[in-house]
Amino acid sequence: MQSTSFTTGEAWAIEEDAGSIDDTSVAALAVSEDAGGSVGVVVTAHVVTARVVRCGVGDVVELELLGGEHGGVGTDRHCLGLTGGSVTEVGAELGLDRPTFTMGSNFGDLDNDGWLDAYLATGDPQFESLIPNRMYRNDQGRRFREVTASGGFGHLQKGHGVAFGDIDGDGDQDLLANQGGAYAGDGYYKALFLNPGHGNRWVTLVLEGSTANRAAIGARLKLTLATAEGPRILHATVGSGSSFGGNSLRQEIGLGQAQRLELVEVTWPGSGRVQAFDGLEMDSSYRLREGEASAELLSAR
Ligand SMILES: [Ca+2]
Ligand SMILES: [Ca+2]
Ligand SMILES: [Ca+2]
């Protein structure tokens, strides 16, 4: 992490053939049915256009990010609300209506509550430009709360690729952010934020395709939880997250205060075959192989 090289992308690599990430990668957003299928999406300066591939209430929402150019104030990120197939601007209601000069961003679940949080790596190419990076916590799908200062994420250096991933294998996602600008003298160290943990439950799933690509990019997950308030459904899709920075392909999924993980259903890319795994313990890591009936326990706490 001592490198000050000017790097604009970031990706976690956990498998030797986990696949590569490029600027047209498909972003997938986990949506909880608790939210009635609506979700806030942060689209950065580099992804100013987006095409809805598939969405629906309680379903996984996917956006194909088509790329774009760095825009000015007011155009450098948009917030799209997707409900029942419609696309609406909901930046103001979600607390994401400020110009932030976002260069790169990504999402992950830092407090393992099952709601995806977002880090915005901000900046402008001009040497003298200093714009703070921002961390937003998802308040149960109702609103994003800025936790830049309270969470210790503040950085003035120019931000680029952002990657969420559990680098120390303790069940919570950590955060790697590229810092520094393109001009000589404007370089800076990368920032790696280790997560202190938040007491919520989690499960880590490493998917391995056989007919599908081995890294299972594009696989869709549906998790059914038992909670004190009744059943809760979480969705996730294997992928890099953002187009500018790449999350871990391991699915590091926060389960909140769930009592049990009842069922994990995987829809494998390509064949569309659905495979169900039960009997998985929380706070554990498993490998799920396409076509193999039982999950392989990798680690348990
Ligand atoms: Ca969260
Ligand atoms: Ca961690
Ligand atoms: Ca930790």
Image: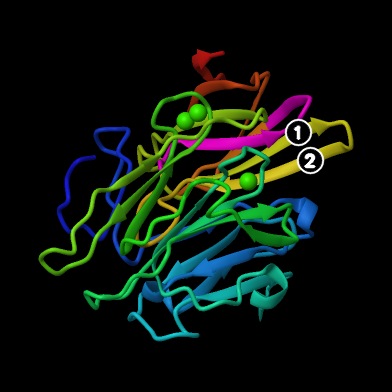
Q: By what rule are the colours in the image chosen?
A: rainbow
Which quadrant of the figure has residue 228? Answer: top right
Please determine whether, in this image, residue 173 is positioned above or below residue 104: above
Residue that appears at 34% across and 80% down? 70
Q: Are marks 2 and 1 in contact (CB under 8 Å)?
A: yes
Please determine whether, in this image, residue 120 is positioned above or below residue 289: below
- Residue beneath label 1, please? 225
Mark 2: C-beta under 8 Å from nearest atom of ligand 1: no
At label 1, the amino acid type is: Leu
Magenta stretch: residue 77 in it?
no
Q: Position of residue 149 (x, y in %)?
A: 54, 53
Q: How many marks?
A: 2
Left or right, 216 with reference to 53: left
Q: Position of residue 237 (x, y in %)?
A: 53, 48
At label 2, the amino acid type is: Arg
Cα gap from disc 2 to disc 1, whole angstroms:
5 Å
The magenta stretch is 248-263
- Residue beneath label 2, please? 232
Name the quarter where the N terminus is drawn. Answer: top left
Mark 1: C-beta under 8 Å from nearest atom of ligand 1: no
